[in-house]
Image (cartoon, helix red, strand yellow):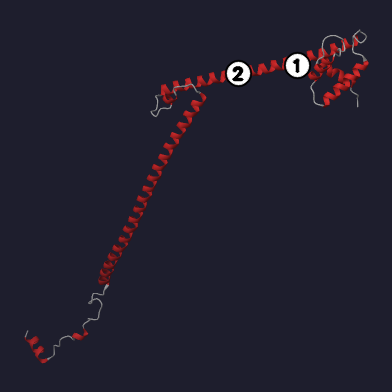
Amino acid sequence: MDDFLHNLRSGKLKQGDRSNRPYNDQQYKGGGPRGRNMVDRRKGHFDNTKESSDRLNAIKEILETLVDSQKKMAETYEARTRAEERKALAMEVIAKNLYRLANPNAGDADTLFAVGSPTVEEAAKNSVQHLQTLDDTATERDLATQEAEDEAVYSDDAQEAANADEEDGLVADQQQEEEDLDAPGRLTEVDRHTLFSVINQMRDEGTGWEKIARHISAQGYPTISGKGNWRGVMVKNLYDKMAPTS
């Protein structure tokens, strides 16, 4: 202890130079690895906070977009539902009108197409009755059509028979004329030419065969056979016979 005090007084024991202290060392300034890590950690914390805020904003925008999309989908579905309801109502009105057209005397149209839906049994019963009514209507229509066709066929057959009878009558008249050429009171050759001229003139004027026949009978000309009265068929037959062939 005495030696230490002596050395201190004599200046042999010198204090260390403060200027040589490592104040410039980053380790003493907090610039060492530990200090840098602290700063880096604080910096990362602030950066993470900013990124989280950006992510929250993005999530918020996505949620708002989803809400708008769901709202639009709900509006679209509601509009589609209303359109389907209007379509169903229109189809109901059309079906009701068609049913009334097919069954003018049916009085169950309002009941069949009531707003309240009928039960399964009632719907099946109404469908069966409707089909039976349609079948009966179709059967009546088919019967009427068949009767009309049969009547048309009978009419055609009757017309053909009448034409055949008329042709047979012409043949019989021709045969009778040939047989009665020499009979007394028959139409002379001069009368034939005279009547041909009269017939030709009246035909040029547009006169019908029956009217010409009445005119010839009124003039007192006998028929070709000398029996009965003149008819349109006889006049035409005489005219065709005496008309010059070209």
Element type where label 2 sits in the image: helix
Give the labeled residue for mark 1: 160
Say which of marks 1 and 2 sits in front. Answer: 1
Badge 2: how crowded within 10 Å, few (<14), some, or many (20+)? few
* Image quadrant in which you'd find residue 224: top right
* Image quadrant in which you'd find residue 18: bottom left
Q: Is residue 96 above or below residue 218?
A: below
Image quarter of the N terminus = bottom left
Q: Is residue 30 above or below residue 70?
A: below
For image coordinates 41% across by 22% down, the residue present is 122
The residue lying toward the viewer, choosing from 49 and 73, is 73
Seen in the image, is 121 located left or right of residue 215? left
The residue lying toward the viewer, choosing from 155 and 125, is 155
Q: Amino acid at mark 2?
A: Ala
For image coordinates 57% across by 18% down, the residue present is 140
Q: Amino acid at mark 1?
A: Glu
Seen in the image, is 115 located left or right of residue 159? left
The residue lying toward the viewer, choosing from 190 and 105, is 190
